[in-house]
Amino acid sequence: MKKDKICYLPSDVSGLRYARDLARPGQFPFTRGIYPNMYAGKLWTMREFSGFGLARDTNKRFHFLLNSGQTGLSVAFDLPTLMGFDSDHPKAVGEVGLGGVAIDSLEDIEELFNGIPLAKVSTSMTINAPAAIIFAMYLACARKQRAKLAQLNGTIQNDILKEYMAQKEWIFPPRPSLRLIVDTVRFATRYVPKWNAISISGYHIREAGSTAVQELAFTLANGFTYVEEILRAGLKIDRFAPRLSFFFNAHQNFFEEIAKFRAARRIWARHLRYRYQARDPKSWRMRFHVQTAGCSLMAQQPENNIARTAYEALSAVLGGAQSLHTNGYDEPLCLPTHESAQIALRTQQILAHELGLKEAVDPLGGSYYMERLTNQMEEMAESYFRKIRSLGGVLKGLEENFFQREIANAAYQYQKEVEAKERIIVGVNEYVNKEELWRVPIFKIDPRREREQKVRLKRLRKRRSSNRVRKSLDQLKRKAATEENLMPHILDSVEAYATIGEIVDSLKEVFGEYQEPPSAL
Amino acid sequence: MKRIRVLLAKAGLDGHDRGVKVIARALRDAGMEVIYTGLRQSVNAIVRSAVQEDVDVVAVSILSGAHMTLFPKIWKGLKRYGKRDVLLTGGGIIPRQDQERLAKLGIGRMFGPGDSTQEIVRYIHKNKNRR
């Protein structure tokens, strides 16, 4: 963000009214935090995102992290799973288990959570286009563990709009995708009330190169779009709004990031209360997860990333995050090793216990600079909302490449600033080591895993009742053409051990596939 | 002087197109002709475009981890269809060991986080057109 001064004065925040714009933590508009005593009451959830290889490999990492004091699970799926391909699909070649864990069917989910009581842990799953299917697998697995659905705690990301904008792992076109999201929200509201059926994500928008303001504005614009879709499906705002959750990036400009988090809460609270007429204060409260910026990590002198991650994590804590993921320092090179994953977790534990951060809520509240930045973030986001409205909304903006272009422009601008040394990146464009020491151990996935998973899948296909699979998929297709909630039918298919690829293919027959609008570079 | 023609492609299933788009603009600003294929191109589609567009350079972005599967296949395809003299380069999250193994096959340099676009421009100028 361009700044016109370096010293901030009371006159910079003269319009600020405490009760209206800040208020106590735990009070509308929640600028200072959503709970009165924040971390003094309950620490944030330390949730390290992990997944690789086959279900049993990731299961081992989960047990390791839980034994290291992690307080929630977070599952990374491999790309074939994210795209709805089975591990034996031709497009999955060379990708199985690489960027996350390979999941084909309920059998794999059962192995993934083997020995982990789903009634007790909270699990976040980064899954979007096929989120309804993975959610159904999780529910089926919990049922087999004899857990009650009402006990289950967790999140599915389930945010397709930011996929079209930034991360680009889509399957179906926007309309049926939104329908699946509404279906999961309705189902969760009724049967899995403690579940967050959507995590509206700015993280990936930022990683794709956006500015902090764009991350804030586009994420909230997506949030409003979901609210309107769910309202249109007939749910009352206070029935579902308390379970909407968010996910932001913690990037390099320390104070701007904190201001972004504070502004996000205030904007959400105001819109939910005044625009969508929510009455329940829980509907006004924005809860969010934060991950430190993967794109800020450098392959050069990778150990420096430990320091970068720690500062970014600190901004998330000062910004009042509910849960946090800290990146492994080796992630520009490979998936994190056991050791780097532990350093990342320890970084959070140091923040939580050694720095005295629990002793005051929103310690930067009232700083002229912080309040001015927070106001500016809000104003600039509001100006984007007006722009998006004038385009005809988020879906129209996507069709016209508005978001994609804004993000790509910002990414190129950033890169030019780095190359012109207007931005210094330590070890990259300044303080460069002549000899890269490169002592970092590289985490490798055994390439035999792919074959192993294919064999596993083949055996499953032989063992299960193909009659039951076919029937459930036929039923699902029929229902996909109606307006009925698809969740119960997806659950049936999953419990028949239909694979993710089979379910996605059945839905593709009815829904079609998304085609990205051709983009001008 | 003939402008350098570059095919930029995203192979594999990942949708991370920040890098490839930044590089497309940087190469264009450096006076090259850039053809960008879009996301999730198959090996065959990349080879076909390289032949049809008669490019000097094929640059492939892969952040999914599938580089050791895809780069050798693309390289083989290019050679099979008479593009022996093309420079195949690329980038993504590619560990050095893997970079060295790809180099042994005759594939060009792999760039990663923190590398500058100007370095890539210089590299292409120096290494294109071994024909």
Image: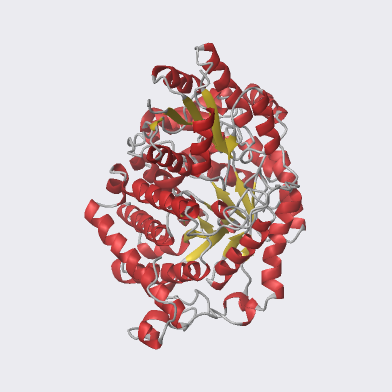
Between A184 and A158, the one nearer to me in the picture: A158
Q: Where does the image place residue A227, in percent across and percent down from the top left? A: 36, 57
Q: Residue at x 69, y 28 (%)?
A: B101
Q: Where does the image place residue A307, in percent across and percent down from the top left? A: 66, 62
Between A105 and A81, the one nearer to me in the picture: A81
Residue A281, picture quadrant: bottom left
Between A307 and A451, the one nearer to me in the picture: A307
Taking the image as shown, residue A319 lies to the left or right of residue A146, namely: left
Q: Residue at x 55, y 48 (%)?
A: A126
- How many tags in the picture? 0
Q: Residue at x 35, y 42 (%)?
A: A174
Q: Is residue A37 in view?
A: yes
Taking the image as shown, residue A456 lies to the left or right of residue B116, namely: right
Q: Where does the image place residue A212, in percent across and percent down from the top left? A: 44, 61
Between A328 and A22, the one nearer to me in the picture: A328
Q: Residue furthest front?
A: B1
Q: Where does the image place residue A270, in percent across and percent down from the top left? A: 35, 71
Residue A451, picture quadrant: top right
Q: Is residue A85 in view?
A: no
Question: In this rendering, is residue B54 above or below A288?
Answer: above
Question: In this rendering, is residue A470 above or below A19?
Answer: above
Taking the image as shown, residue B71 lies to the left or right of residue A167, namely: right
Q: Quadrant of the N terminus of chain B?
A: top left
Question: In this rendering, is residue A59 above or below A105?
Answer: below
